[in-house]
Amino acid sequence: MERIASFSVDHRLLEPGVYVSRRDADEATGCVTTTFDLRMTAPNREPVMDTAAVHAIEHLGATFLRNDTEWSGRVIYFGPMGCRTGFYLVAFGTLESADVADLVRRMFAFIRDFEGEIPAPSPRSAATTTTTTSCRRNGWARRWPTWRTRSTCLDDAHTHYPALLD
């Protein structure tokens, strides 16, 4: 079996950033999607995000993205990586990291500043509700806009994957 592209990235060199993970095209329709790796931590060098924070960020991020006037019709999916070092954002179009930088910044500012009950807090609307009340999501979301708003942070080192494994 062939190794998938995301497992070919040398994670020892990966830094937090907004990476184009992959692009997929349907030949029959011509539809193109872009998957972004919104990397929150430096893998294997920083702690992973706790489950409660990841779950709260997932609910708030999805809510923000589905309600954003510019992007709601283009966003297909927002959700966590199993390794808990970041999130995937999938959108229609042939996109680059710079195309979604402002959207991602605004989303994390929304998550950081959100007050009140996390969306979908009941067993009727979510598969598990024991992990959606995390205040720790504020710390993770606060970290994002801090380093993402400086123009130097959208350089190649934070938008293009580092060396690939053999």
Image (cartoon, rainbow, N blue to C red):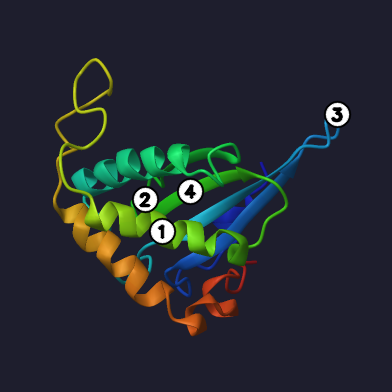
The disc at residue 83 is: 2
Q: Is residue 16 visible?
A: yes
Q: Can you tell which of label 2 and label 3 is closer to the viewer? A: 3
Quarter of the rendering containing residue 139: bottom left
Give the spatial CA distance, label 2 vs label 1: 24 Å
* 135 relative to 47, above or below: above
Q: How many marks?
A: 4
Q: At numbered mark 1, what does the secondary structure look like: helix, strand or loop?
A: helix
The amino acid at mark 3 is Ala
Give the spatial CA distance, label 2 vs label 3: 33 Å
Q: At numbered mark 4, what does the secondary structure look like: helix, strand or loop?
A: strand
Q: Is residue 47 visible?
A: no
Q: Can you tell which of label 2 and label 1 is closer to the viewer? A: 1
The amino acid at mark 1 is Arg
Q: At numbered mark 2, what does the secondary structure look like: helix, strand or loop?
A: loop
Q: At numbered mark 3, what does the secondary structure look like: helix, strand or loop?
A: loop
Instruction: Answer with left or right where residue 30 lies relative to residue 5.
Output: right
Residue 156 position within the rendered picture, expressed as x and y whole percent measured from the top left: 60, 78
Residue 43 position within the rendered picture, expressed as x and y whole percent measured from the top left: 38, 65
Q: Residues within 10 Å of mark 3 (few under 14, many from 20)?
A: few
Give the spatial CA distance, label 1 vs label 3: 34 Å
- Discs 2, 1 touching: Cβ within 8 Å: no
Residue indicated by mark 3:
28
The disc at residue 106 is: 1
Of all residues, the one furthest to the front in this rendering is 69
For the N terminus, give its image quadrant: top right
Quarter of the rendering containing residue 141: bottom left
- Between discs 2 and 1, the one toward the N terminus: 2
- Between discs 4 and 3, the one toward the N terminus: 3
